[in-house]
Each structure stands twice: as C-alpha cells, then as structure tokens.
Image (cartoon, rainbow, N blue to C red):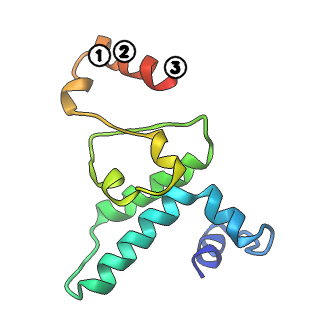
Amino acid sequence: MWVQGIAKRAKADPGCRPVADVISSLSAFYEFEERRLLTAVNNPAYRPDKNDILDSEQLPYLGDPQLHFITCDGGYLARIKQSPQAAQIRKVALGELTTVEKVEALLREVTA
C-alpha cells in the first residue's frame, strides 16, 4: 500500500517496478515512514507536525547513492537504522556550519 500511495502522489504507475525494488530504492524513506507509523499506532495522542512531513520529503533523494544529506536534526538517524542509505545521512553540530572553512572541510569529507 505504501508504494501505491507514493506512486499515486507522483502520478506514476505503481506496477511499473516490483514493490521490493521500490522499497529498496527508497529504503531510508520507507524506514522513516514505517517508524513514524509505528509511533502513531502506539501513541493515540501522536500528532505529526509540519516538520515530520518536511523531514520525510527529503529522503527519496537518497535513492541516488551520489547524494548525501547533511542535517543538524538527530531525528533522521534515530528512525533510520537498517537502511543502507543511513550512511548517506550525516548529522552535524550547528558549530560545524559556522564558517566557510568549516563547511568546505565538511563537504570535502562527505564527498571524498
């Protein structure tokens, strides 16, 4: 159902690729959404905020192994533990982004 919902939002044919391939290609996104759903199921008072939606919308880009995601938000890696795409997510402290030199060093390290 998850793949069908994603395909519908993208106006794509949900049958154009096997479900397992789609889940594998979007594994970080899938795992994040699965954990979010489990949180909601186990906590009737759970109310997603706008950040939850924005957070999840960043993750499909990790389907491209050339791309990396740099964030100060620890919530991504708290929810994404099994996906091989977790290695493409880099949590940094805000202090690592305070100067051009620090950002350049970080980008060189991430893209090396």
Q: Amino acid at mark 2?
A: Ala
Identify the residue at image location x=27%, y=40%.
72
User: Alpha carbon of mark 1 to alpha carbon of mark 3: how far?
Assistant: 15 Å
The residue identified by callout 3 is 112
Secondary structure category for the residue under label 2: helix
Identify the residue at image location x=28%, y=34%.
92
Q: Name, please, the residue furthest toward the top.
A: 101
Above or below for 96 versus 40: above
Residue 36 in picture, x, y percent from top left: 36, 71
The residue identified by callout 2 is 105
Secondary structure category for the residue under label 1: helix
Q: Quadrant of residue 101?
A: top left
Residue 10 in picture, x, y percent from top left: 64, 66
Q: In the image, 45: left or right of 39?
A: left
Q: Earlier in the sequence, mark 1 or mark 3?
A: 1
Disc 2 packing (10 Å; few <14; some 14–19; many ≥20)? few
Q: Name, please, the residue furthest toward the front.
A: 82
Above or below for 102 versus 88: above
Secondary structure category for the residue under label 3: loop
The residue identified by callout 1 is 102
Q: Quadrant of residue 91?
A: top left
Closer-to-camera residue (11/45):
45
Above or below for 95 versus 13: above
